[in-house]
Image (cartoon, rainbow, N blue to C red):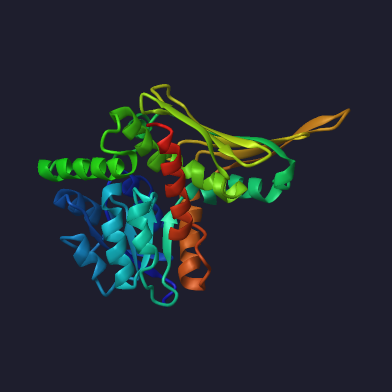
């Protein structure tokens, strides 16, 4: 295979415009060969902006394009399962933004689809590729020394940050019936897990799990392994979620709050008897904001804090490099479909406490 991967993008919305398109365009290991979206106006805008010569009228046509090495699925979540199946069957390499699917039932049959030798299917959990996270994982003591873990997402959502930093093209030509169908399909998928009689706030809380919380659940598992179970979970108004994960001799506390206070307080803290590990994530919607890892250690007579960072490298760029290595050098993807299934199982287990 050529050292330059020819890629096609399905879905050209906010995340594609803010992260994937500029990163792919700036990386000489990739060439954006083709694009498609339900909005013709958005396709024209992106094609002109990034000099993309091939504009496909549908996702099916793009996936069938023989010129492509890899397909990037960057669409709304309710389209992931069907597009993922088509992309895997095409034999092309696949990058799909998290969540791979909205439910475990959707993902289960895709795990057994035959893949051609060396075909990569990579799920985009960019927080796991942060340098600060890698340092935390490298320096973490044995699990038996851990006393408590706190994982948090206390945030304001993207529009506040995006409006002040980047121009996002918002198309006006998407038919109203397409938008309505997408919302209806999403609700049906969420209710297939949460139940037909699930109240709206609990349904919204499950959707928060599949979106915002998926990054934290995935990172928690990468760091600590899978929990033994969910000891407790609750939600309030759909956008406050609390969960306690059972790790035997310690508990991992997860907190998610979406509000209108303009900050992004996300991170992981690990406590042992004599050390406190603390790392942060800032909003991904402003590129290259710093992350850092702080390690405070104490003895009977002394205490001190080591700081690793600030680190400015964009986790999305590191993630893109990992995808390239998986494809070109045959390295296994750590954010695989099988790995993503573990998150979907956790979402459902947490969600059961909401009903």
The quadrant in which the N terminus is found is: bottom left
In this view, 319 is above or below 262 = below
Q: Where is residue 293? Give x, y as percent.
A: 64, 39
Instruction: Name which residue lies at 59% across and 50% down.
Output: 225
Who is closer to the viewer here, 205 or 80? 205
Who is closer to the viewer here, 110 or 312? 110
Instruction: Name which residue lies at 34% across and 53% down.
Output: 105
The answer to whether 221 appears left or right of 191 in the picture is right
Who is closer to the viewer here, 328 or 169? 328
The quadrant in which the C terminus is found is: top left
Residue 336 appears anywhere in the view: no
The answer to whether 350 appears left or right of 171 in the picture is right
Q: Where is residue 146? Give x, y as percent.
A: 70, 39
The answer to whether 224 appears left or right of 203 in the picture is right
Q: Where is residue 133? Give x, y as percent.
A: 59, 46
Taking the view exactly as shown, the residue that stands out farthest to the top is 261
Count numbered badges in the picture. Answer: 0
Who is closer to the viewer here, 262 or 212? 212
In this view, 113 is above or below 76 = below
Q: Quadrant of residue 156?
A: top left
Taking the view exactly as shown, the residue that stands out farthest to the right is 301
Q: Where is residue 206? Give x, y as percent.
A: 37, 37
In this view, 129 is above or below 56 = above
Residue 40 appears anywhere in the view: yes
Instruction: Name which residue lies at 25% across and 40% down.
Output: 187
């Amino acid at each position: 295979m050529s050292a330059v991967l020819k890629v096609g993008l399905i879905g050209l919305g906010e995340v594609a415009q803010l992260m994937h398109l500029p990163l792919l365009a700036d990386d000489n290991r990739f060439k954006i060969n083709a694009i498609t979206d339900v909005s013709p106006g958005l396709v024209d805008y992106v094609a002109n902006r990034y000099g993309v010569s091939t504009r496909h009228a549908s996702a099916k046509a793009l996936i069938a394009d023989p010129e492509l090495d890899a397909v990037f699925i960057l669409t709304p979540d309710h389209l992931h399962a069907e597009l993922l199946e088509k992309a895997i069957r095409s034999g092309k390499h696949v990058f799909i933004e998290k969540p791979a699917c909205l439910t475990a039932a959707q993902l289960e049959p895709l795990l057994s689809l035959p893949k051609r030798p060396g075909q990569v299917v990579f799920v985009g959990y960019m927080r796991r590729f942060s340098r600060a996270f890698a340092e935390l994982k490298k320096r973490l003591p044995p699990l038996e020394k851990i006393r408590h873990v706190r994982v948090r997402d206390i945030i304001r959502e993207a529009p506040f940050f995006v409006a002040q930093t980047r121009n996002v093209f918002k198309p006006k030509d998407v038919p109203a019936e397409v938008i309505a169908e997408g919302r209806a399909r999403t609700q049906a998928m969420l209710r297939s897990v949460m139940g037909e009689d699930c109240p709206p706030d609990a349904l919204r809380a499950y959707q928060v799990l599949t979106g915002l919380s998926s990054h934290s659940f995935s990172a928690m598992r990468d760091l600590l392994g899978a929990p033994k179970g969910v000891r407790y979970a609750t939600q309030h108004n759909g956008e406050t979620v609390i969960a306690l994960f059972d790790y035997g001799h310690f508990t991992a506390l997860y907190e998610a709050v979406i509000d209108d206070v303009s900050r992004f307080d996300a991170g992981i803290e690990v406590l042992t008897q004599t050390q406190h590990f603390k790392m942060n994530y800032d909003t991904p919607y402003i590129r290259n904001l710093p992350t850092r890892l702080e390690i405070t250690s104490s003895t009977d007579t002394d205490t001190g804090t080591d700081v690793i960072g600030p680190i400015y490298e964009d986790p999305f760029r590191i993630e893109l490099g990992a995808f390239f290595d998986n494809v070109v050098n045959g390295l296994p993807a750590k954010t695989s479909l099988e790995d993503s299934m573990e998150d979907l199982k956790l979402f459902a287990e947490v969600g059961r406490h909401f009903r």
